[in-house]
Image: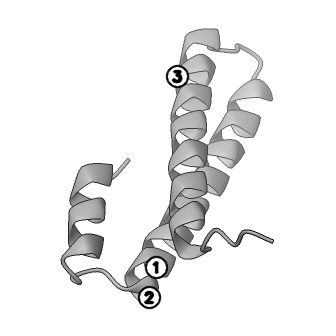
Amino acid sequence: MPAFNDDLFARLWLEGGMNDDGYQQQLEQLKIEHRDLDDAITALTMQSVVDQLQIARLKKKKLILKDRIMRLEDQLVPDIIA
């Protein structure tokens, strides 16, 4: 999993170094990694000998990616008070 530092991205955003396109690219990359982890988990569960520890680790990584995806999506979509 590539390094992802939320503080760094927040700083870049505030300093004008990260635009919506940069966030969108990062978001797409994270979604691809999330799908890849899902595929890996599925493949591991179909094996005759299931490594529960490895599956648990992949699921944890998947949850972390999901959290990062949600934070990036929140930054891309402004809060609108109706």
* Residue occupying image coordinates x 29% and y 73%: 13
Instruction: Give me the C-alpha separation between circle 3 and circle 2.
Output: 31 Å
Query: Where is residue 58 shown, x and y percent of the image?
Result: 56, 30
Q: Please tell me whether mark 2 sits on a helix, a strand or a loop.
A: helix
Answer above or below: position of 50 versus 78.
above
Which residue is denoted by mark 1 in the rendering?
25
Hey, what amino acid is under mark 1?
A: Gln
Could you say which is closer to the camera, residue 69 or residue 58?
Answer: 69
Which residue is denoted by mark 2 in the rendering?
21
Hey, what amino acid is under mark 3?
A: Arg
Residues at discs 2 and 1 in contact (Cβ within 8 Å)? yes
Q: Nearer the viewer, mark 3 or mark 1?
A: 1
Query: Where is residue 25 shown, x and y percent of the image?
Result: 46, 79
* Residue occupying image coordinates x 29% and y 80%: 18
Answer above or below: position of 11 versus 6.
below
Q: Please tell me whether mark 1 sits on a helix, a strand or a loop.
A: helix
Mark 3 / mark 1, whichever is N-terminal: 1
- Local packing at callout 3 (Cα closer than 10 Å; few below 14, some 14-19, many 20+) is few
Residue 60 appears anywhere in the view: yes
Could you say which is closer to the camera, residue 66 or residue 44?
Answer: 66
Q: Which mark is residue 35?
A: none
Which residue is denoted by mark 3 in the rendering?
57
Mark 3 / mark 2, whichever is N-terminal: 2
